Amino acid sequence: MTARTYGTTLPGLPKEPLPGKLIVIEGADGSGRTTEVALLKAWLEVEGHAVVDTGLRRSTLVSAEIDRAKQGHTLAASTLALLYAADFADQLENKMIPALWAGTTVLADRYVYTLMARAIARGASREYARELYSFALRPDLVIFLDARTEILLHRSIGKYGSLDYWESGMDLSLSRDLFESFFLYQDRLKREFEWMTTEYDFHRVDANRFPEQVHLDVQKLVAPLYGKASPAPSAPAPKMGNPLNRGRRRAASG
């Protein structure tokens, strides 16, 4: 990948291309990101590529502090945004860039786009969000798993047994009702992802389907990065009932 950022130049980052590839899987909570990252990692490794995965709140610097700070449900929006920016910067410097230098594929289970959308939904301007994360590397490919809010709701409840306070936007006082707040907050995030689709070159994939069907479409997007033809279409997925019920039974979505 070409070592380019969205604006701010990282100290010590060379201008020549990095040997590895950065692939981002984006989408709301419950869209199936974590499942897809696992499937994609397994497929790429079988194809002979070294792969590391990363995601939000995984740095050794501030991830534990973010979790502790969120427990009180009293974080200011600006503080939350800066904590996540520090978490991302730590991972970028100490995990992503070294892996890319080594020729490894980095799979990101969400990237700065989710962080930007969350910050804007909580009152930040788009200009502020762009500037805050302008040091991020430009990925080789961004795949956005697009799922209806009703699907996200059922999958989240099926996986966790309840809705998350922060993923439902309860800190924004949109509604006293958790379910209504969830829908209102997800609508805000969707609006932000809409304008990012063009600006940051998202490749949208219908995530309202079974994981196997989603994964085939993702493979078709990823294969050309490695000079491979897109995988041949597989046989139609068998009828296995409502995907909502399946997601509830298996809790397979990320």
Image (cartoon, rainbow, N blue to C red):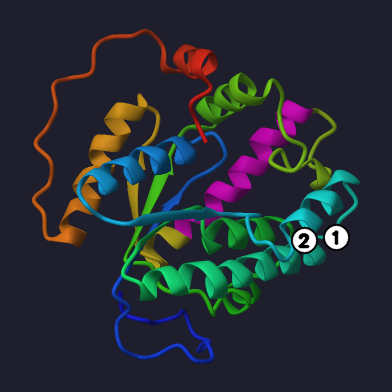
Mark 1 neighbour class, 10 Å CA radius: few under 14, some 14 to 19, many 20 or more: few
Q: Is residue 121 above or below residue 182?
A: below
Residue 51 position, x and y percent, is: 36, 55
Classified by dominant secondary structure, the portion drawn in magenta counts as helix
Disc 1 + disc 2, Cβ < 8 Å: yes
Q: Is residue 87 above or below residue 231?
A: below
Residue 18 lies in what quarter of the image?
bottom left
Residue 159 - label: none
Residue 253 position, x and y percent, is: 50, 30
Q: Is residue 36 above or below residue 213?
A: below
Q: Is 254 on the left-hand or right-hand side of 231?
A: right
* Tag count: 2
Residue 80 - label: 2
What stretch of residues is rendered in magenta?
178-195
Reading the image, the residue beneath label 1 is 76
Helix, strand or loop under label 2? helix
Instruction: Give the CA separation, mark 1 to mark 2.
Output: 6 Å
Task: Inspect the image, locate mark 1, and give the three-letter code of the amino acid beneath it.
Answer: Ala
Query: As rendered, which of 219 and 127 lies closer to the eye?
Result: 219
Residue 166 is covered by the magenta coloring: no
Q: Is 42 on the left-hand or right-hand side of 134?
A: left
Task: Inspect the image, locate mark 2, and give the three-letter code of the amino acid beneath it.
Answer: Leu
Q: Is residue 64 above or below residue 35?
A: below
Helix, strand or loop under label 1? loop
Residue 108 position, x and y percent, is: 46, 55
